Image: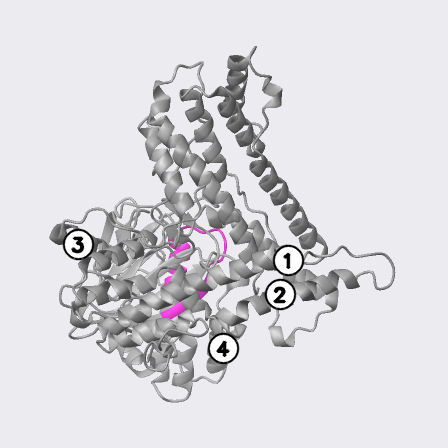
Amino acid sequence: MAAGSRPGGALLLPLLLPLLVLPAAGGGCAAEGGPLEPFDALYASGVEAYYGGDFAGAARCLERALRSRRELRAARLRCRRLCRAQVRLAAPGPGAGGDLPFFGSVLRRADCVRRCEEPRLGAVSRHRAAEEVRADFQRRVPYSYLQRAYIQLNKLEEAANAAHTFFMANPEHMEIQQDLENYKTTSGKVSLIDREARQHMEDYSAGVRHYDKEEYELAIEFLERALKGYYSEDEDCQIMCEGPQRFEEHEYLDYKAGLYEAIADHYMQVLACKHDCVRELATRSGRISPIENFLPLHYDYLQFAYYRVGDYVKALECAKSYLLFHPDDDDVLENAGYYKGLLEGTVDPAAIKPRKEARTLLRRHKLESHLLQVAAAGLGYAYTEPNYWNRYGARQDEHSVPSSISSEPEDGPRLSLTKKPMPKPDRELKEGGPLLYSDVKFVYNSQQLNGTQRVLLDNVISEEQCRELHRVASGIMLAGDGYRGKTSPHTPNERFEGATVLKALKYGYEGRVPLKSARLFYDISEKARRIVESYFLLNSTLYFSYTHLVCRTALSGQQERRNDLSHPIHADNCLLDPEANECWKEPPAYTFRDYSALLYMNADFEGGEFIFTEMDAKTVTASIKPKCGRMISFSSGGENPHGVKAVTKGQRCAVALWFTLDPLYRELERIQADEVIAMLDQEHLGPSEMNINPKDEL
């Protein structure tokens, strides 16, 4: 629940600071020539040049990094495609040695790929970028650097396009939105270029826009082009999955599996990657969620568009193609029957078949699914088949139900799109239970906070306890603690410091801070857990998932005209997708978290308000000013997107708590802290004076 730098007023993003630890490529971009320079080294050089004020060098290195990454993919595709054609995999024969022809062809293909790639790429190990770097390119972070570098070089058109490219993958970023508005105002440039646009998606979106305008000829042109691009991209995706895979449960160098177990383990990961190409091709760059029902929707739009231009053969062909994915769709079944009636006496409807490429892809997809499920059942391979062809494909954007459908006669064809039902909560939601402690003051409930499962309380701890806890914090906190060592994990304009309960008790036991004060941290977190469990009327035990004392400090000289957030809008147990108005409960989100709480320790700072928003990450529904003893608690799901406004002066401190109803996800450090407390109590080494038992139930 918690922040990038503005040297010379430049935009820096929460994701950028970790890149400072990347190895630099010899202090700058080397001259081009020879094997392809690794994109991660060029990226590091670009970042180093940026922070050194060499904006021309930064732009040059970053552009080369982006180009190197594209060329790396193109070289791998070309070589793998070439070697597929040149070295066919032989079928194993019977008897002893019958497998030698197959493995011989595998070895020859591997040698072919290596010989093809080496002249351009050099050693394979040169291009193994760290996962964090790959994630930055996926999120288009290099373009945020490029934008600011081009501004410094007075190249406004290049800066605008870089900003737009970044924005397309990060639509919730408030500062980049403002920058784009400034570009449009100052330069009059309205049409911006997404430099990482996926052409098949651009064509699809254009086709749907033309459809909405009832420009059916143009809709057909773009949707057919989108389909052609989709199948081409699908082939590329399949080929790229044949690259290195990660053994999720094994360190590669220590891997001791037998021949067939090792082959099965690796191949299942390759196969899962190939099977997921359907999702990959339906997901916009940098986004979390795919466009639902993406491929079938092409055929759904086309069947109706072809009908409107009078091409009933193509209309029936596309309707039958759609029905491959959804054979029980009543609307399209009805449409297909209608088209057959129109063709009677001119063409035999039975001779019109679904499109070959759709049949081929679906056949392959079903076989992949079968193999993955066989592996899951027999080899212990963890796999759950996603719903790739969800028919609730209508989102709140360009692929919603076309407006022209409403004017169609009841007996005419129509699209099959339907509204997506709202998900049901996974448990009964209640609130309003006793607060357990007579000094705790109720302030607002969910209704007053304009949301669901929210409560605001005051006087959870006293002024003296706030001061004592703050003294403990100053003695035990480390910069970057709890944020993988990143001192500015959410914004470069603030420094983050933190500490855990176990660390506080350890310091207390060692005499580095007063033991009574260290124990206070433990006790107040337990008090908060009891209050949350009671107020939300939970019928099972609420366990600690993570407890963290955290202070964020505004960095001097970096607050002028600041409009980023101290912690961007997010949800605590799912991946917030503002454009899709969804929150996806899937890794890397902490999906096991059920409730969250923030207990504030001070108010002597500027900014730092806690905010709830709608799922669009823009519309603020409640804003809370922290102060000593105030606690906000809420359920951790997509019903409660939240963030923290910029801390522009001073230091803001709080105890952040996350809870789970699943004992399997209990906080390990909390269990260890419980053991320390039991030991201290046995040794009579001084529990705090705070009584964590309820005084008077209200």
Q: Residues within 10 Å of mark 3 (few under 14, many from 20)?
A: some
| Earlier residue among tags 1 and 3 | 1
Question: Does 541 lie within the magenta span?
Answer: yes
The reply to whether callout 2 and callout 1 are in contact (CB within 8 Å) is yes
* Above-or-below relation of 205 to 697: above
Label 4: few (<14), some (14–19) or many (≥20) C-alpha neighbours in 10 Å: few
Q: Amino acid at mark 2?
A: Cys
Please name which of the two marks, 4 or 1, marks the residue nearer to the observer. 1
Q: Which residue is mark 1?
A: 86
Between label 4 and label 3, give the one nearer the viewer.
Answer: 3
* Mark 4 vs 1: CB contact within 8 A: no
Distance of label 4 from label 1 (alpha carbons): 69 Å
- The image shows residue 113 at horizontal and vertical percentages of 59, 65
Few, some or many residues within 10 Å of mark 1 (<14, 14–19, 20+): few
Residue 360 lies in quadrant: top right
What whole-number distance in Å separates the C-alpha atoms at marks 2 and 1?
8 Å
Q: Nearer the viewer, residue 301 or 20?
A: 301
Q: CA distance from mark 2 to mark 3?
A: 49 Å
Q: Which label sits on residue 112? A: 2
Q: Earlier in the sequence, mark 2 or mark 4?
A: 2
**Residue occupied by mark 3:** 183
Distance from disc 4 to disc 3, alpha carbons, whole Å, reads 62 Å
Q: Residues within 10 Å of mark 2 (few under 14, many from 20)?
A: some
Q: Residue furthest right?
A: 95
Q: Which residues are magenta?
A: 526-548
Question: On residue 678, which mark appears?
Answer: 4
Q: CA distance from mark 1 to mark 3?
A: 51 Å
Instruction: Work out whether residue 668 can be spotted.
Output: no
Amino acid found under the numbered disc labelled 1: Gln
Secondary element under disc 3, as helix, strand or loop, is helix
